[in-house]
Image (cartoon, helix red, strand yellow):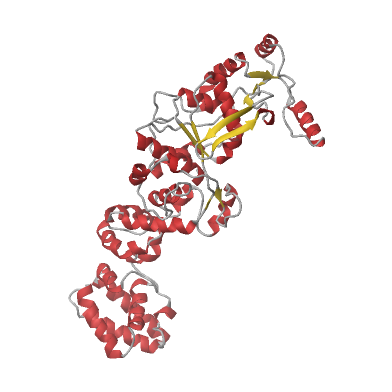
Amino acid sequence: MHIGNARSALYPYLLARHTGGAFILRIEDTDQKRYSPGAEQELIDGLHWLGMDYDEGPDVGGPNGPYRQTERREIYDEYSWKLVELGHAFPCFCTPERLDRVRQEQIKNKQNPRYDGTCRNLDPDDSRRRVQNGERHVIRFKMPKEGSITANDLLRGPITTENSALDDSILVRSDGLPTYHLAAMVDDHLMGISHVIRGSEWLPSLPLHAHVIRGFGWEEPTFVHLSVFLKPSGKGKLSKRDKDLAMKDGYSIFTGDMQSLGYIPEGVLNWIVLMGWGVSEEDVMTLDEMIARFDVNSLTPSPAAINFSKLDHFNATHIRQLQPADLAARIKPYFLKENLEVDNETLLKIIPLIRERLVTLDDCLPFAAWFFRERIEPKPEELIAKGLNAAQSTQIARQAYAILSSLPEITHDQAEPPMRALVEQLGLSPNQVFGLMRVAVTGQTVSPPLFESMEIVGKPKVLARVKTAIEILEKMG
């Protein structure tokens, strides 16, 4: 499930929730050549992760089931022959070999490759008899040769196409399963779909779909073809092949990857919803706020360039908006995956110190994993204060140890004043003294605020770590 799928689901979800309609998950799995085991579950998991719970679907049921198109074969068979009886479709018995020869000849003659109409005017009774005898066939739409058709896209208005430019497209394959061109039109009608919101790659098929729907005499749903996603450079359409390039920079266009990369659904949804919706690209919205504000008429056909920096911005913003207990629950698995023992009380104390620094959830590890380690291993060279040598740094560490060990408890209020007095006494900068202490206590040069962190770690652990740092420095001196 990539961001194109997610956006194509999000807009109808918002429309359904805004208007009190129903949001339906339909699995369009009739193209067995492209079938991928596990893809359906990944799609369902992705929708649930993003918070888009559907009213009807294959795993929840509903009045319009079944919801897998491969389980609706008899329905499509009935409607395909109804279209034949109405004179808008016909069985085609041409072999793939013959069709390929015709195609190659057309290309050779610099003609537009298309079906040559061999079976269009076969006797209907004879065709039906050949089908009943088991002769291999497909069913094609019988496209009018003259005139034009005007179909409407909500974002682009009326689109008129000459019928002569359209092919006799296949509606039912030789394996008996329908193509999207028939199955989706039938299902949209039977399921009472009011709005078809889909990718712009379906725009060239809109005239055919309008012909199929009108061939049955049905009312057309409102068609909305969404804007194209462009590569981050803005040059060229985004494709699944761009995944590898994105992953090199720590990003992905797939929702499953985003989850493992530490993105939260609130941030991902906020990022996706603005790419094609005519509201400010800076608007921070929760899903409920999106539902309240959504207007399908505000969607725009203008191409949207993928901007991963904006994804980071929205993700970090929504992380900061999480309640402390919620954020703690979301980052805890990252610590557990590192085999760290995490108690909830300590974790909740850490949240205020790191929340403003998190862009993705996995940022919790470099900022806070050291809280839960029994021992840390600072790099010896990082313990040496800037502009000083090992011996001078050892003296600083010893004096700091003496101050901290004399305190009843190491709290922010008790530890900071005497440590700042030490800085003044030594005639050094806070960065020199506190930088050394930061490495000694946390094992790293960047961390949450030092004294608040020391308070959470506790006096015994702080003193043990400073003592270890003194021993390391002494060996260097």
**Which residue sits at x=59%, y=35%?**
34
* Number of residue marks: 0
366 lies above or below 203: below
Q: Quadrant of residue 177?
A: top right
Q: Quadrant of residue 107?
A: top right
**Which residue sits at x=30%, y=65%?**
353
In this view of the protein, which residue sits in the foreground, 344 or 229? 229
**Which residue sits at x=40%, y=65%?**
366
468 lies above or below 366: below
Give how far across and how far down residue 163 sits, in percent.
66, 28
Q: Quadrant of residue 328?
A: bottom left
In this view of the protein, which residue sits in the foreground, 6 or 437? 6
Give how far across and how far down residue 385 sits, in percent.
39, 83
**Residue 53 in view in this figure:** yes
348 lies above or below 163: below
**Which residue sits at x=58%, y=30%?**
150
In this view of the protein, which residue sits in the foreground, 164 or 195? 164
In the rendered structure, the answer to whether residue 217 lies left or right of residue 322 reads right
